[in-house]
Image (cartoon, helix red, strand yellow):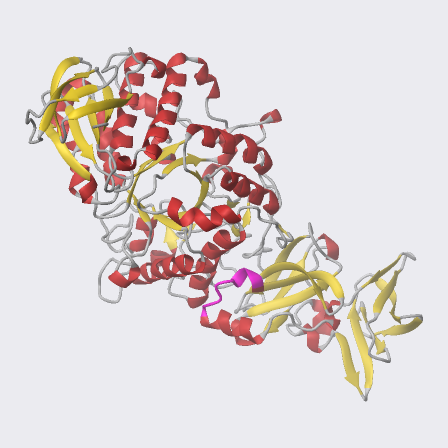
């Protein structure tokens, strides 16, 4: 009892609650602040006696087997009643223990975290947390004056899991875990690693959220999304940082419910097929944009509670739009309430900083070789896909996971067992994650942000690949942005930068990303990268987007760049909606919308995005004029499309262009059209190709190429 009072008892269920003594039930209770305490069973009240030398501890016989209610009285005469948490048996079963120990509990969130439930006839919340090296773990909150002695948890054997059912507590309860490390030292209070909710920053306690019972209205979407995420589908992604997409009164971020209307309607009108959200997992620092998460299982409360995030996903599905989340399994922050040294030992992270500390970001690196940590991450991926019907995960910073020497000097990293730089454990975890997510949630996609030439990122795991559905094409992005930022007079000397990407375009299932990383940290906006006057900048950007939408690969564009905002992205504000008052910016927005419409409606532009048969150069070598032309092909019976780009400010009114077929070619889109802010020069009504070979093609025609433009021609026969 002295250990109970001191808060060092590690097996409270052996001491507190009901116990059979000589065939009679005896109840022992620890209730600091009480001077009298009794157990009520129906109309009968059984006084419990104070235990000498153990202040706040009461004990005595409570005959029978019926549930009892505890009634206490303080020195000031105040009275209160409460259920005894130590009269309730375990919630977790042997299967949970086995799967957790084996590292295969792919629904880990069903076992760990805080779950509102009815248990043994009482309503309350079940808490469970993994802390294998802890000497003692308690649930604390306002409900027990943050006193870790009052609700010490039950240790569940060799799994390292601690659990307790607290009757009377439910939705909205604020809590943390108080943990004594293996040396008995009290650690900083910890948030729940598998908690479903959190307080508003800067407060950082977990909050009980009941995530059961959402009535999903998106059965039709879920039945058909596999086709919408396929390599043959048109995929055009609008990347969004929700907090800075649009601000509301007083500068507050948009809510999930508001985004379900405003963002979804905007994306639908713009013709994008998917929304990609920067991480929505709970994170303590706004300036991390979500990429330093603490609550991997908690949708950030900045925009609302979990069921309202589901409202956003459901609204998107109702408009035929998929939702992709950025997911961060590569590292986690060092905040005291987070995962670092969670039970007084390096539990989630490596002990050696050469493996466990990210110098670039001052964060900790997961120990991918530890069974329970792998399980934690893989289950988290499945959690977002199953519980929130998310359609895909874009995995952040994959390169930092694949290589042990990532951003490290000689001597600052530990080689693998073969003396190499590859992180075998991380590679294995990513492969297992992809197998598990695609197996559990058919029709989803996973996407790798991988900036090196690591092979077979988007190949199946049974073929030696990492198993991702898609990979960001960072090389294409870097080369083409470097080219388009140059003065047109110099572009002829860098012509290959726009064609080099085709040498490896079909080695992976690529997404062409113009992401948030390209418009921040002094890089300027997309419009700001363009050379020339304001009008020339807009023309350059229109031509570049035409090149991008005509190029093989799925598309991704960060918010604000669809209308060419002039300032680089600022996470603390909102994108520059006022720019749409300028005709050039509104024209650019309309162009992106029409590019999406053309891309979605023209099979030749998307069906073989990842197949070499879907692409052929017409002219890749006209460096002198900075002109590029190529063919896009779809499936049998799909009309061919031809894309022609002129990246000089020189108009070419009679450019001879080789074409694969004679006959009528419709000018399906011209980035110089007046409705887009251009001068309206082009090929009104289309062109007629004659059977005169040119550029290695069977037919040709004279085409008007406006300056700084991209044209899309579709064969009509």
Q: What's drawn in magenta, residue-wise?
A: 103-110
The foreground one among 374 and 657 is: 657
Q: Is residue 498 magenta?
A: no
The foreground one among 411 and 90 is: 90
Q: Which image quarter is the C terminus in?
A: top left
**Image quadrant in which you'd find residue 485:** top left
Answer with left or right where residue 87 lies relative to residue 329: right
The foreground one among 40 and 430 is: 430
- Total label count? 0
Give the prevailing secondary structure in the magenta stretch. loop
Q: Is residue 18 above or below residue 485?
A: below
Identify which residue is drawn at 24% across, 23% down: 666
Q: Position of residue 654 (x, y in %)?
A: 13, 14
Single out the residue that lies furthest toward the bottom. Answer: 22
Whether residue 392 is visible to the viewer of this picture, yes or no, is no
**Image quadrant in which you'd find residue 325:** top left
Q: Is residue 109 magenta?
A: yes
Q: Which image quarter is the N terminus in?
A: bottom right
Whether residue 626 is visible to the viewer of this picture, yes or no, is yes
Identify which residue is drawn at 37% across, 33% down: 557
Single out the residue that lies furthest toward the front. Answer: 717
Single out the residue that lies furthest toward the top. Answer: 679
Q: Position of residue 241 (x, y in %)?
A: 46, 35
Q: Position of residue 57 (x, y in %)?
A: 80, 70
Q: Position of residue 119 (x, y in %)?
A: 71, 67
Answer with left or right where residue 421 lies relative to residue 652: right
């Amino acid at each position: 009892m002295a250990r109970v009072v001191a808060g060092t008892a590690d097996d409270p269920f052996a001491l507190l609650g009901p116990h059979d003594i000589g065939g009679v039930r005896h109840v022992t209770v620890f209730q600091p602040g009480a001077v009298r305490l009794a157990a009520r069973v129906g109309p009968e009240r059984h006084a419990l006696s104070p235990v000498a030398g153990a202040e706040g501890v009461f004990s005595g016989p409570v005959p029978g087997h019926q549930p009892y209610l505890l009634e206490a009285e303080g020195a000031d005469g105040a009275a209160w009643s409460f259920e005894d948490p130590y009269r309730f048996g375990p919630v977790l079963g042997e299967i949970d223990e086995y799967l957790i120990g084996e590292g295969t509990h792919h629904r880990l969130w069903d076992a760990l975290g805080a779950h509102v439930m009815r248990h043994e006839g009482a309503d309350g919340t079940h808490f469970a947390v993994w802390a294998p090296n802890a000497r003692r773990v308690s649930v604390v909150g306002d409900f027990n004056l943050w006193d870790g002695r009052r609700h010490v948890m039950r240790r569940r054997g060799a799994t390292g899991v601690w659990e307790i059912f607290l009757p009377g507590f439910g939705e909205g309860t604020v809590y943390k875990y108080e943990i004594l490390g293996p040396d008995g030292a009290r650690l900083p209070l910890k948030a729940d690693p598998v908690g479903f909710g959190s307080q508003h920053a800067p407060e950082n306690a977990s909050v009980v959220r009941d995530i059961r019972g959402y009535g999903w209205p998106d059965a039709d979407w879920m039945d058909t999304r596999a086709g919408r995420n396929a390599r043959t589908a048109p995929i055009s992604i609008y990347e969004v940082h929700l907090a800075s997409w649009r601000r509301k009164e007083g500068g507050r971020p948009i809510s999930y419910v508001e985004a379900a209307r405003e963002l979804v309607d905007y994306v639908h009108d713009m013709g994008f097929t998917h929304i990609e959200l920067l991480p929505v997992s709970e994170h303590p620092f706004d300036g991390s944009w979500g990429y330093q998460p603490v609550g991997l299982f908690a949708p950030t409360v900045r925009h609302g509670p979990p069921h309202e995030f589901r409202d956003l996903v459901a609204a998107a599905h109702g408009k035929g739009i998929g939702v992709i989340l950025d997911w961060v399994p590569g590292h986690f922050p060092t905040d005291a309430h987070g995962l670092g040294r969670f039970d007084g030992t390096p539990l989630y992270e490596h002990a050696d900083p050469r493996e466990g500390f990210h110098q670039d970001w001052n964060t900790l690196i997961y120990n991918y070789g530890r069974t329970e940590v792998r399980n934690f991450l893989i289950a988290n991926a499945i959690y977002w896909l199953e519980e929130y019907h998310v359609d895909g995960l874009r995995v952040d910073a994959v390169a930092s996971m694949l290589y042990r020497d990532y951003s490290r000097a000689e001597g600052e990293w530990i080689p693998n067992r073969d003396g190499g730089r590859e992180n075998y454990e991380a590679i294995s975890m990513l492969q297992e994650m992809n197998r598990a997510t695609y197996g559990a949630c058919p029709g989803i996609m996973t996407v790798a942000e991988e900036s090196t030439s690591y092979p077979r990122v988007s190949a199946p795991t049974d073929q030696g690949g990492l198993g991702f559905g898609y990979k960001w094409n960072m090389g294409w992005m870097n080369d083409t942005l470097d080219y388009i930022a140059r003065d047109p007079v110099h572009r002829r000397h860098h012509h290959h930068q726009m064609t080099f990407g085709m040498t490896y375009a079909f080695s992976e299932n690529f997404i062409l990303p113009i992401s948030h990383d390209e418009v921040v940290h002094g890089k300027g906006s997309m419009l700001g990268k363009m050379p020339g006057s304001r009008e020339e900048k807009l023309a350059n950007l229109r031509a570049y987007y035409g090149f991008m939408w005509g190029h093989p690969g799925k598309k991704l564009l960060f918010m604000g760049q669809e209308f060419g905002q002039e300032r680089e992205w600022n996470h603390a504000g909102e994108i520059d909606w006022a720019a749409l008052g300028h005709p050039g910016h509104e024209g650019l927005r309309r162009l992106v919308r029409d590019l999406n419409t053309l891309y979605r409606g023209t099979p030749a532009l998307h069906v073989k995005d990842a197949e070499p048969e879907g692409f052929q150069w017409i002219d890749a070598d006209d460096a002198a004029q900075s002109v590029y032309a190529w063919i896009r092909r779809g499936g049998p019976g799909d009309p061919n499309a031809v894309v022609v780009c002129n990246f000089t400010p020189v108009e070419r009114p009679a450019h001879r262009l080789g074409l694969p077929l004679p006959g009528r070619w419709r000018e399906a889109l011209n980035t110089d059209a007046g409705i887009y802010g251009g001068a309206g020069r082009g090929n009104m009504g289309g062109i007629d190709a004659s059977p005169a070979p040119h550029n290695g093609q069977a037919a040709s025609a004279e085409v008007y190429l406006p300056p700084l433009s991209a044209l899309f021609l579709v064969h009509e026969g």
